[in-house]
Image (tube, helix red, strand yellow):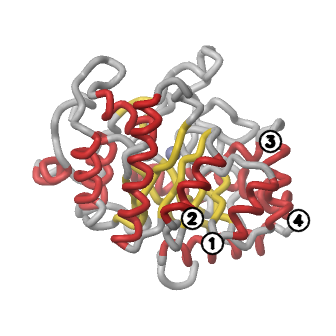
Amino acid sequence: MSSPHETTNAAELTAAGLTAAGLPPVRDREDLDPRGKKRDRSWPPAPEPLPFPVIDNHCHLDFADGDEQLSVHDHVARAAAAGIDAQITIGSDLEAVRWTAALLAAPDCPPSLRGGVAVHPNEAALHARGHDHEGRELPSLDDALAEVSDLLRGSGMIVVGETGLDWFRTSKKDDRARQAQIDAFRAHIALAKELDLPMQIHDRDAHRDVLEILEADGAPERTVFHCFSGDAEFARECADRGWYLSFAGTVTFKNSTGLREALAEVGLGQVMVETDAPFLTPVPYRGRPNSSYLIPLTMATIAEAAGVDLEPACRTVRATTQDVYGWPVGDAA
Ligand SMILES: [Zn+2]
């Protein structure tokens, strides 16, 4: 497990006696921010805890970040202290997919943790090409999808994701990469229906095409736009179709007026909250490491933009998340 590119599978990881506590993250988050500047890697202080607990429905515990290495158990404990009493961790490339399956199958996996896996759209493009950015050989897209399908049947898996289209990273000229993304997206839609699981969508600069494919194939009953990035009009289109919008730290960014308008437009009925940790750290800690314990900052903005007090907002968001994932069962403490 030392190298992220050793050929291991989830069964081998757990058979090797690895516990959740002993499972090291698969990889490090980049040390540079998107502008190429060195990031501050110190963990932000814990915000005031939420008045009612919510669930982080999308994070990546397979990533390491920060000047101090946090274990899965550390992330869970910090989250609980801040009023985030459950988390869904997402594995989005083959290594992370296997890691997530092994974590969820580990005997000491925290009971407040569930997960989901998929071949991320940008990974689909790499599988179609046959090698990763460093030139290392990758299995075919079909083989990757088959492994995802297999592992989604394992313990603790409650969602197919993240899948969708990323037109930001793949240019219009790269037909093969775009087609691989479309093929993978459609395969995941079929898989979510077959397994009767909710599906989390990654939609970057691809609103129209994502919507078209969902309409053409028929969206899974529980379809979630992870890290929703559309405007008020697109939010309305999604909400009218019965889909769910999950907001990340981006909603707190100064220039994200469109996201706050989207919340004002649709209200909280089909809204959830997430971190996408270790990425998308909310204001005022942009660029620093992110973890579920920072959700109170994002939740405060969501409540304000929707025009609802924080406690009822948390109750509504929690109830929606429980409905969508069928978990956690029972009332929050
Ligand atoms: Zn993500």
Q: Nearer the viewer, residue 125 or 316?
A: 125
- N-terminal of the pair, mark 2 or mark 1, is 2
Q: For mark 1, give the secondary structure.
A: helix
| Mark linked to residue 55 | 2
Looking at the image, is mark 2 or mark 3 earlier in the sequence?
2
| Disc 4: which residue | 307
Identified by mark 3, the residue type is Ser
- Compared to 237, does 5 lie above or below? above
Give the Cα distance between marks 4 and 1: 17 Å
Residue positioned 44% across, 35% down in the render: 122
In primary-sequence order, the first of circles 4 and 1 is 4
User: What residue sits right under mark 1 in the picture?
Assistant: 318
Marks 1 and 3, how far apart in space? 23 Å
Q: Which residue is mark 3?
A: 256
Of 291 and 280, nearer the camera is 280
Along the horizontal axis of the image, is 78 left or right of 93? right
| Quadrant location of the C terminus in the rendered image | bottom right
| Mark in the foreground, 1 or 3 | 3
Disc 4 residue type?
Answer: Gly
